[in-house]
Structure formats: structure tokens, C-alpha cells
Amino acid sequence: MSDKLTIFGQNLRALCRRKPSISSVARDLEVGRVQFGRYLNGTSFPKPDLLDRICRYFNVDVAIFIRPLDEIEAEQKDWMKKANALAYLQSAASYIEESTTYEGFSRHLPDGIHCLWLNSFSDLSSVHCRLMQVRTVDGTRLIKGYDRVGRLISDNFPAPLLKKEYRGTVLASSDGFTILTFGQAPARHLTMTFISLDYIAENLLGGFSVLSRGEYAGRRRITRCVFQLLPQSPVDILRQARICEKKMTLEDVPEIIRNAIAPSHDLV
């Protein structure tokens, strides 16, 4: 408790420096000056109702009880930047036509776990297959998936599981749909994948993926891809998951997919 009292006292002093005087703060909060001094010195802690008044008065979170003020405010600024960006993206989404719905696309992109086959962006000799979960929430199609563990290690990006997760959404158009995905480090993982409604086979749709980054020798940033609609039985999904964990070259890929994503067909 003593550490928390110290942190709270230091935070309270920093907040008081933003006001005309400590006495004015104590008066506004209806706290005796002596008692308020105990809070500042870290020898006493206010009751819940007074703590609530202090937080409202300074417009801060109750986290001032356990975390340094500068750390809290830096985090708040970061969240505000994200919130502003998301608010702008939300307004931009209003340009999407109302006709861009998914009722007619349910058979092309059903909810469930499916697979995306594509050439590696960072290793010109490798092919990836990634499992993606598609689900509909309040009429919005959402995407979630994970990068292959072996690929991250080989690319010198060791990271906990959450760092390998990527999320995204789906936008429909007249001739296909676009999947936008973001990783926790968007500079390394921000992709757009367009899937055409022209079937290569009964359960295979062709398209292309673009990684948002500059041009580098020995790496690609755009490639053909195939979206595979999987049977939704646990056995079939587990079988595909084991395939996705393997490091593959083009020769390891089923012929019909290999022909569709062959590098010679890549866009420039």
C-alpha cells in the first residue's frame, strides 16, 4: 500500500501544479488543508467518494492510484490518436454504397474458417497458406488470423501469439470482395486482398494480395492468391491447419493452386 500511496501523492502534486494553488484545490474539493496535505505527502488515501471527486475534478482516471501520471497521460494521448484515426475512417466508410451488402455473397464467403494461399512477400521461394476466420457481426464481415510461427522466427520477428494475430474486415463490390487486414505492427502487416467471384474450381476463388510497403530487392509486395473455401468439419480444418504450419515451396502446393499463383503470373 505504501508504494501506491507514494504514487498517488506524486500524481496529486503534479495535478495540483496545473491549478492556481493547492489551497484552491482543497477548497474546491471541500477537503481540509491538513488532510489534503496528507494525501500529497503519501501518508493517507481518500475514501472512494472523494477519490471519485478528485478524478472528476482533474478529469483523470482512477489509475492515478497505481500508475505514474505521465505514463497514464502518454497512453491516453496514444489512444486519442487512434480514436481520431478510427473516427475518420468511420466517416470515410460512409462512402460505401448501401448496395454493397453481403446477402448475395454468403455462398461466396460464408462464415467459418477458410484458407488463403499466396506467395511469400519476404521469401521469393516460399508459399504460405493462412487460415482465416470469417464471421458476421451486426451485418459486418470480420476477419481474424495468425501468421505462421515458423515464418516469424525465420524472419527474425520473434513475438508472443498476440503479436502474430492480424484482424480485418471485408468490403464487397460488384465482381468480388476486398479483405483489409492489420497486424499489431501495421508497418509490417497492412494488406489488401481482392478476391474475384470467378471460380478456379468449386471451392477456389482467385485474386491478388498487396502488402503496403516500399519496393525492396529480393522481396515482393504484390502476388496472385487463391482463397479456398474449406469444409467446416473439425477434421478438415485441423488437416488444413497442419498444412499451413509447414514451410512450403511452389512444388509442394496442389497443382490447380500452383498454376493460379505461379510467380510468372504476378502483377507488377
Image (tube, rainbow, N blue to C red):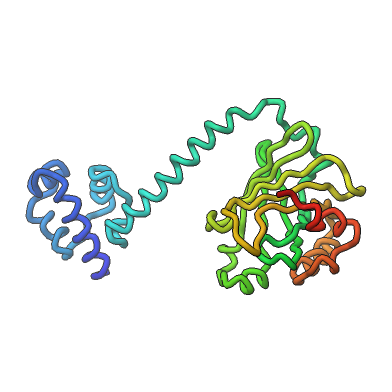
In the rendered image, is residue 36 in sight?
Answer: yes
Direction from residue 199 to residue 227 in the image, left or right: left
Quadrant where the N terminus lies? Answer: bottom left
**In the image, is residue 241 above or below residue 86?**
below
Report x, y in % for residue 140: 66, 39
Would you say 183 lies left or right of 61 here?
right
**Residue 146 seen in the figure:** no
Q: Nearer the viewer, residue 123 or 129?
A: 123
Q: Residue furthest top?
A: 98
**Picture coordinates of residue 124, whole percent (x, y):** 71, 65
**Residue sitting nearer the eye, 165 or 187:** 187
Residue nearest the observer in this picture, 181 or 10: 181
Q: Residue at x 56, y 63 (%)?
A: 163
Q: Is residue 231 left or right of residue 83?
A: right
Depth check, front residue: 211 or 197:
211
Q: How many discs mark residues in the rendered view?
A: 0
Which residue shows up at 27% across the image and 56% down it? 69
